Amino acid sequence: METQGHEKISFRPGYRARAFFLIFDYIFLILLMLVMVIPLLKVFVDSVDPTTYGIRLWPKTVEFSAYKQVFSNSALYRPFFISVLTTVVGTAFGLLMTTLAGYVIIQKQMPGHKFVVNFIFFTMLFSGGLIPTYLNIKNLGLMNNLIAVIVPCSLSAYNMILMKSFFETIPSTLYEAAAIDGCTPVMTFSKIVLPLSKPALASIGLFIAVGLWNEYMHFILYMTDPKWKNFQVKVRDLILNDGISGVSITLSQEMLKSAVVVVVVLPFLLIYPFLQKYFVKGVTIGSVKG
């Protein structure tokens, strides 16, 4: 329809509603980002500003004496090493077992396939509970042993199901072509499946690593010997007891607490940007199948 030689512009139905939704969505996400960023910023400011503790998002003065004390104190070296060791070994073990489990349960010709899948899914809904798990760890002789932390924290039924869903998105023709070329199941897994699974490996590996790095409950329950406590338990002691055993506090308590919190959070703040593209793709790629 034309009016005075000009074409009349009409919007598609729902265009305004979509525009309002996008505006609201962006505002909501910005507010959500601020809710997460502002506390981190405040903690960092408190760790470098020796002035009176309070609510501020920009330091009046900057000094890194709290970080120097954290990094120079030998009492924190062993807990930090235990956290790093648990995270690295646990992530590698968890990825290995999760990928193997996911590859096995997509083999529909395997005897008992449906039972195995349902059994794994059942463990997502019901668990043995805290007391039976503790008694099981104790009876196995795993008290004060890092295995008691690595195995339970690195294996997850959810991750296995997620990996299974990802493997199912790989075209079946690739498996058939590999079989025709004489590849064994192990060769197919190592030569074809794993190279195509970088997004899933990155996302699940990040899940496992973050969980292991932040773990403290298993260390409190199963590590009765203080020498096996990890870095997060030491941070907890600092926050709850206003001090760490073996640490000479010459700075304000709040500066030292904030510096330790930043040290705990910093590794994954640095790692996540490099894994973000894999993380988003790995989480969503198995959600919708064509």
Image: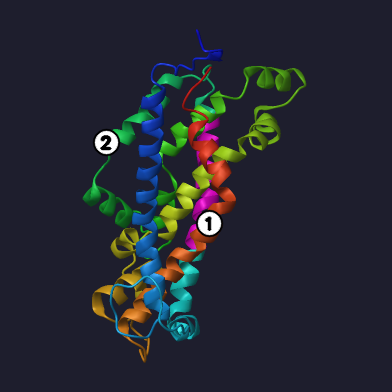
Furthest residue toward left: 131
Element type where label 1 sits in the image: helix
In this view, the residue in front, 158 or 17, is 17
Q: Position of residue 119 (x, y in %)?
A: 36, 28
Side of 169 where 230 appears, left or right:
left
Density class for disc 2 (Cα within 10 Å; few <14, some 14-19, many ≥20) is few
Task: Write down the region rendered in magenta.
Answer: 85-103
CA distance for labels 2 and 1: 27 Å
Q: Which residue is mark 2?
A: 126
Taking the magenta stretch, the answer to whether it contains residue 68 is no
Residue at 39% in and 52% down: 33
Residue 112 appearing in the image: no
Q: Which residue is mark 1?
A: 89
Density class for disc 1 (Cα within 10 Å; few <14, some 14-19, many ≥20) is some
Q: Is tag 2's residue or tag 1's residue first in the polypeptide sequence?
A: 1
Q: Relative to 165, does residue 32 appear above or below in the rendering?
A: below
Taking the magenta stretch, the answer to whether it contains residue 93 is yes
Q: Which image quadrant is residue 219 in?
A: bottom left
The amino acid at mark 1 is Val
Side of 13 where 85 appears, left or right:
right
The amino acid at mark 2 is Phe
